[in-house]
Amino acid sequence: MWFQTYCNVRIKDKEFEPYISSSDIQSTIQKIADQINTDYSGKSVIFVGVLNGAFMFAGDLLKNIDFNCEISFIKVASYEGTSSSGKVHELIGLVNDIKDKHVIILEDIVDTGLTLNKIFSMINHDEPASLEVASLLYKPEAFQGKHSPKYVGFEIPKKFIVGYGLDYLEEGRNTKDIYELKDK
Ligand code: 5GP
């Protein structure tokens, strides 16, 4: 649970207050890793982290994966400030050979699901053995996509959050904890 010693943070013109603590994040990631270790043991697996937001989640999750695997990254962008632009741009594609491998996409957060729609069409084109998603955070009320994440750390309401990889106007990614936008 959250301890009140964590303070609000200010990023550019907005103030954010504590929402999910580092210790809760780490214990949740351990549970996701345990599930993946059970489900994928003995399989040929490639994890694909979605930059920029998933870099911390990918790093901490992979430390707890106990089978040999590949890890790669792709980069897409859709958010402008505190809301989705509705258009998803591929900035860096996948270079690895994924044919007949089990692909697990690592997302920081699934909101509308439009980013996942785009990523699924990019990756399915290369004929993986299977394709699933692990997302640290998921906003089910905002979701309107075709592919919901199989592994979810925290289901959260429709609110704007930063920290632990998530940004506001490219700042705020470098915190251990997650913060929510403070109501005025
Ligand atoms: P979707 O395409 O599912 O709407 O959005 C996915 C991407 O939007 C995430 O990978 C993330 O970059 C960004 N995003 C969605 N919700 C939030 C949020 O609450 N805070 C931040 N900082 N980014 C978000």
Image (cartoon, grey):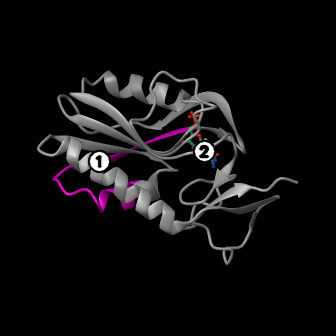
Which of the 4 quarters of the picture holds residue 140? Answer: top right
Dividing the image into four quarters, tell me where ligand 1 lies: top right
Residue drawn at the location 21% of the way across and 47% of the way down:
38
Quarter of the picture holding the C terminus: bottom right
Which of the 4 quarters of the picture holds residue 27? Answer: bottom left
**Residue 123 visible within the image:** yes
Element at label 1 = helix
Q: Which mark is residue 35?
A: 1
Rendering coords of residue 5 (x, y %): 67, 78
Q: CA distance from mark 1 to mark 2?
A: 21 Å
Residue drawn at the location 20% of the way across and 57% of the way down:
66
Q: Is residue 100 left or right of residue 52?
A: left
Rendering coords of residue 62 (x, y %): 31, 57
The reply to whether the magenta stretch includes residue 132 is: no
Nearer to the camera, 87 or 105: 105
Element at label 2 = loop
Tag 2: amino acid: Ile
Rendering coords of residue 175 (x, y %): 58, 67
Q: Is residue 125 left or right of residue 66?
A: right
**Residue 70 visible within the image:** no
- Within 10 Å of disc 2 (Cα), the crowding (few <14, some 14-19, many 20+) is some
CB within 8 Å, label 1 to label 2? no
Q: Which stretch did the figure color magenta?
A: 58-77
Residue drawn at the location 47% of the way across and 30% of the way down:
116
Nearer to the camera, 1 or 48: 1
Q: Which mark is residue 156?
A: 2
The reply to whether the magenta stretch includes residue 76 is: yes
Q: Which mark is residue 99?
A: none
Residue drawn at the location 61% of the way across and 27% of the way down:
87
